[in-house]
Amino acid sequence: MFPDRVLSGMRPTGRMHIGHYHGALKNWIRLQEEYECLFFAADWHALTTHFDESESIAESVWEMFVDWLAAGVDPTRATLFIQSRVPEHAELTLLLGMITPVGWLERVPTYKDQQQKLPDRDLSNFGFLGYPVMMSADILVYRANKVPVGEDQVSHIEVTRELSRRFNHIYGREPGFEDKARAGVKKLGSKKAKRYEALRTAFQEQGDTQALEAAHSLLEDTQNLSLGDRERLFGFLEGSRRVILPEPQPLLTETPRVPGLDGQKMSKSYGNAIMLREEPAVVTQKIRTMQTDPARVRRTDPGNPEKCPVWGLHQVYSNQDTRDWVWQGCTTAGIGCLECKQPVIDAIIREQQPIRERAQRFLDDPSLVRNIVADGCERARKLAEETMRDVREAMGLRYD
């Protein structure tokens, strides 16, 4: 019914580090070759936990966009935009908030998790509690049906799916819906109409999800339907409601864990990050001074790679032959820690060289980035306006 569309975003934290690159940006670069993609700077989301430290948000947004572009995100293949420049995000957040039970928000795993992780922050505010509603609006306002996440983030998308179902159930009702849907079935033609009815019956009476998928494919391949008929026929498969806000699906992606210099998750707030555009001399110094297996007090002491954070970087940057060499050399004291670190240093510097070169163009002329983002905001807003026109109509809020 709606085109495949990928949406993802990041809070503006300034310059990216190699954890961002391997955990998200490399996936974005791959996805932009396969789907229509929208990638945004979630500046409003930054306010949910740091509303009293907003002075650096704008600068952080532009630094982040430079890194995205330098990493290989292509503005001719993906739409790059700023959340707050598309006010429809706020409008849909407000409207979805009207139908969201507070209990749903209090049960979101990250709600209590963030309270525990950020004990020094004042999180007793509506913005933080309503964070999942805004996140859902970010996705649904573009009718994005694919959201790239790691396995540990799938639960985050479930709130959006629940809100989509609830909205469609409440507002997808339409006078004469079944008669209009059956009229739409006839427009499929005799053969396709019989196939559609058989698949609909198989799903509704037997719960056959393969039949539902086959019916979706049948409708997507039918070109002579109006948008209204298409929405009704998709809704008719599962009940008696139009699909106004389609449920997004998690798009599972590889998210390798990139350890920080101290073995914890890499984070600028922990002071253990290697930035995406680090100078080679800085990369060398940071890696050479990384802590290693504490059992290796002397060069002749054997070590255990699994107790060394450098081994985690080898998992990301080294091939199997190098990892075998490291394992053998470390456990037998055949190599020293500096020898072990050198392949990682070389690989990071080699990876970052073209990124640093591409970034220079945008650093020399900041207007290039601003023009790319301005165009992206305009494209994003057109898509959001289409969705909100249908949302307002469904909720009885159109006055033209």
Image (cartoon, grey):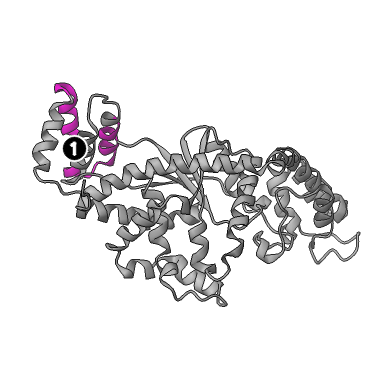
Q: Which residue is rendered at x = 83% and y = 60% of the image? A: 289
> Vertical placement of 290 versus 198: above or below?
below
Q: Is residue 355 visible?
A: yes
Q: Quadrant of the N terminus?
A: top left
Quadrant in the rendering for residue 362 = top right
As for residue 205 lying within the magenta part, the answer is yes
Q: Which residue is rendered at x = 64% and y = 51% of the image? A: 63
- Answer with left or right where residue 14 lies relative to residue 337: left
Amino acid type for the residue under numbered disc 1:
Arg
> Vertical placement of 46 versus 187: above or below?
below
- Between residue 267 and residue 212, name the one nearer to us: 267
Residue ID for mark 1: 200
Q: Position of residue 366 (x, y in %)?
A: 66, 44
Quadrant in the rendering for residue 213 = top left
> Vertical placement of 237 versus 16: above or below?
above
Number of numbered tags placed on the structure image: 1
Q: Position of residue 115 (x, y in %)?
A: 50, 73
Q: Is residue 145 visible?
A: no
Disc 1 on helix, strand or loop?
helix
Q: Which residue is rendered at x = 71% and y = 64% of the image? A: 271
Q: Position of residue 37 (x, y in %)?
A: 48, 39
Residue numbers of the magenta segment: 189-217
